[in-house]
Image: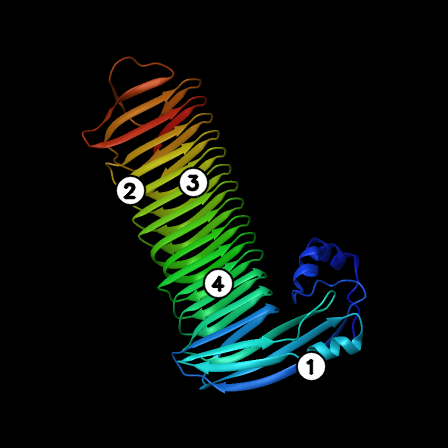
């Protein structure tokens, strides 16, 4: 027997008290004068490899682990909550775990008695299943975990964290309030969504989309076609990734990228700095409304970089094409640009308030002023257009 009365649980429970009172929902809210009784039920059933495991609980966690087996072994932890221990025990003992198999699908559900005010039931599952299996798991209030499986994984929880690891198949995970951790997924598609929580992904392949409304996104070691990251409020970090296309967008937060290789990369921040290192992409488009842009070891053919309020520092690599097209603009901030060796093409340097310094030999067209230099370097087809509303411009070469 365990008392569930505390000021913290009371505060959480109070916010949903009216809902529970009306519906008799079996979500344990930890009200005062509740005691807990637990019992464990173990069951097993044949489960066809390549079939589907469908498991759901209204309140409780779900953990699924793939193994070399041809059956599902289920351990259910049933907890009853009531004003007295006797009634809590009665609720727990009257709750039955059902394993229903039909048409290559094994469905796991709990059947519980009718619940009245200040009474609830939570059921958590630990399941060992065949490795080659599709999984559908749902918890209204609880965490989800799936490991070492080969098949499609779809998980959703209204309030709880989600973890997956060693998955060979498409993954679709969704939590309203909680973090997501996803590692070593072979694809072909990975979709991770959180309304309020961080997302950590590592070792993904194929096509990936990671979205959170409030939280950071970290993606490490990605190989595939497209990588799409979005957060309304939080930092984004990407490292050791190769792809065709990458899009990262944060409304309030910084973006940090290192060792990326792809065809196109587009980074956007409404309020935060951009920090890039070792980037290789024919097309690179980065901008922030409020923050600095620092891009080192950049190999590209077409560069767009902008800041509404912040400095911009770009350093190209020797591998960058001599006919590079780069358009860099800051409304309020200096620009420091290191061009690739042998750059040849048009040059347009302008600042409204500041000075211009160049270490490259420019054949000037028109008048030379402290705030504007236009002309050419060599006979190539490249373009360097560096402009700032307020700040100095420095142009140099490796």
Q: Earlier in the sequence, mark 2 or mark 1?
A: 1
Q: Earlier in the sequence, mark 1 or mark 4?
A: 1
Quick one: SS at disc 2?
loop
Separation (CA) of disc 1 from disc 3:
55 Å
User: Is residue 264 shown above or below 148?
Assistant: above
Residue denoted by label 2: 320
- Count residues near mark 4 (Cα–Cα under 10 Å), then give few for <14, some for 14-19, many for 20+: many
Query: Does residue 398 appear anywhere in the picture?
Result: no
Side of 138 where 374 appears, left or right: left
Identify the residue at horizontal 53%, vertical 69% (top origin): 145
Q: For residue 220, which quarter of the picture?
A: bottom left
Quick one: SS at disc 3?
strand
Separation (CA) of disc 2 from disc 4:
35 Å
* Quadrant of the drawing holding the C terminus: top left
* Quadrant of the drawing holding the N terminus: bottom right
Residue denoted by label 3: 268
- Please name which of the two marks, 2 or 3, marks the residue nearer to the observer: 3
Q: For residue 305, which quarter of the picture?
A: top left
Separation (CA) of disc 4 from disc 3:
24 Å
Residue denoted by label 1: 93
**Circles 1 and 3 in contact, beta carbons < 8 Å:** no
Query: Does residue 113 appear anywhere in the picture?
Result: yes
Q: Nearer the viewer, residue 120 or 36?
A: 120
């Amino acid at each position: 027997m365990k008392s569930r009365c505390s000021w913290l649980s009371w505060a959480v429970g109070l916010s949903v008290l009216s809902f529970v009172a009306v519906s008799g929902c079996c979500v344990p809210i930890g009200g005062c004068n509740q005691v807990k009784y637990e019992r464990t039920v173990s069951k097993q059933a044949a489960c066809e490899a390549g079939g589907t495991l469908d498991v759901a609980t209204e309140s409780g966690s779900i953990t699924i682990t793939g193994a070399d087996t041809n059956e599902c072994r289920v351990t259910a932890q049933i907890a009853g909550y009531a004003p007295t221990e006797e009634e809590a025990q009665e609720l727990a003992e009257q709750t039955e775990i059902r394993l229903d198999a039909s048409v290559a699908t094994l469905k796991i559900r709990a059947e519980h008695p009718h619940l009245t005010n200040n009474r609830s039931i939570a059921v958590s599952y630990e399941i060992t299943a065949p490795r080659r299996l599709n999984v559908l798991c749902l918890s209204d209030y609880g965490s989800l975990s799936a490991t070492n499986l080969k098949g499609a994984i779809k998980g959703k929880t209204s309030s709880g964290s989600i973890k997956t690891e060693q998955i060979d198949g498409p993954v679709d995970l969704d939590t309203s309030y909680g973090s997501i951790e996803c590692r070593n997924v072979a694809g072909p598609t990975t979709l991770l969504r959180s309304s309020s929580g961080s997302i950590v992904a590592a070792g993904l392949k194929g096509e990936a989309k990671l979205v959170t409304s409030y939280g950071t996104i970290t993606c490490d070691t990605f190989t595939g076609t497209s990588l799409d990251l979005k957060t309304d409020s939080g930092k984004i970090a990407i490292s050791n990734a190769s792809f065709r296309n990458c899009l990262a967008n944060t409304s309030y937060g910084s973006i940090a990228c290192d060792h990326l290789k792809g065809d196109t990369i587009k980074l956007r921040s409404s309020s935060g700095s951009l920090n890039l290192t070792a980037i290789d992409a024919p097309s690179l488009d980065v901008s922030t409304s409020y923050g600095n842009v620092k891009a080192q070891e950049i190999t590209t053919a077409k560069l767009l970089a902008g800041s509404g309020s912040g400095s911009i520092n770009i350093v190209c690599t020797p591998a960058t094409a001599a006919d590079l097209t780069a358009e860099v603009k800051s409304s309020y901030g200096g620009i420091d640009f290191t061009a690739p060796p042998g750059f040849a093409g048009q040059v347009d340097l302008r600042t409204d308030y500041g000075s211009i310094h160049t270490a490259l030999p420019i054949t000037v067209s028109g008048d030379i002023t402290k705030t504007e230099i236009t002309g050419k370097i060599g006979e190539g087809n490249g373009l360097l257009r560096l402009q700032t509303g307020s700040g100095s411009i420095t142009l140099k070469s490796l």
